[in-house]
Image: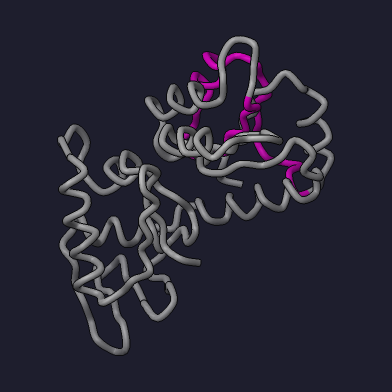
Amino acid sequence: YYMKLLFLTLNKKFPDTLFKNKILKNIKHLVTDSLKELTESLSSQNIIIIDMLLPKHDAIKACKAIRKKDSNSYIIIRSDEIENYTKIAAYANGCNSFIPFNMPADVLAEKIKSINSLFMIKDEQDSYSYKEFSISFKTKEIIKNNISYQLPKIQFRIFTLLTQNPGVVFSNKEIYNYAWEKHTKVDTAALYVHLRGIRTNLSTDYIKTLRGIGYKVLK
């Protein structure tokens, strides 16, 4: 495993049950009810599971605090009943997905395994494929129907971020942090221009906008 598994929860039995699954036997992990301890334990690759309601903070505020330090982790919130407006607020503050409290341990273990495989460091490989596209990191080429395209640097980075993780929603901030140089000031209009450029240059409608949440490509 490349990723570290972090839990923000009061229920220590839940992670204990999960780690009995052989899929997660050797994964590095931390179980805590302290947001401070969790943020201090962030590594370069993390899967974070947060209970929706905790005595000292709620999950949305926790997401926001985590994203100030880390834009790459995959954050999951555990909650049974949740309104759409709360989901939108959670996504806007960095949450990636939701799971119910009663999700079976073996199902969650497979989900974690799947997320881990999505977020393994893929830039080390020379090329990969997404639908009818073949993408090369070495030559920075995107080939579709035997035609070679070369996007501007920012557009190439946005396209590879999204297409290496089909179905995963990335917020504006996550895309900024990945595609632009650090400390570069970027606004929503600039991101929109680059996304429109990708759609136009590659004649694709796979990139979907989730208003107020972020962007993803179809699986």
Residue 110 lies, with reference to residue 88, above or below; the image says below
**In the image, what residue occupies the spot 40% across and 51% down?**
210
Residue 73 lies, with reference to residue 136, above or below; the image says above
**Location of residue 97 (image quadrant):** top right
Q: x%, y% of residue 133?
A: 36, 77
Query: Between 112 and 127, which is closer to the camera in this rendering?
Result: 112
**In the image, what residue occupies the spot 77% across and 22% down?**
11
**Location of residue 64 (image quadrant):** top left
Is residue 7 highlighted in magenta?
no
**Location of residue 131 (image quadrant):** bottom left
Please give the range of residues in magenta: 23-52
Q: x%, y% of residue 156?
A: 25, 62
**In the image, what residue occupies the spot 48% across and 21% down?**
61
Residue 23 visible, this orientation: yes
Q: How many marks?
A: 0
Is residue 45 highlighted in magenta?
yes
Q: x%, y% of residue 107?
A: 76, 50
Query: Between 190 and 175, which is closer to the camera in this rendering?
Result: 190
Q: From the viewer's perspective, tell me whether residue 177 is left or right of residue 122.
A: left
Residue 4 visible, this orientation: no
- Residue extending farthest top: 56
**In the image, what residue occupies the spot 68% across and 35% down?**
81
Residue 28 lies, with reference to residue 203, above or below; the image says above
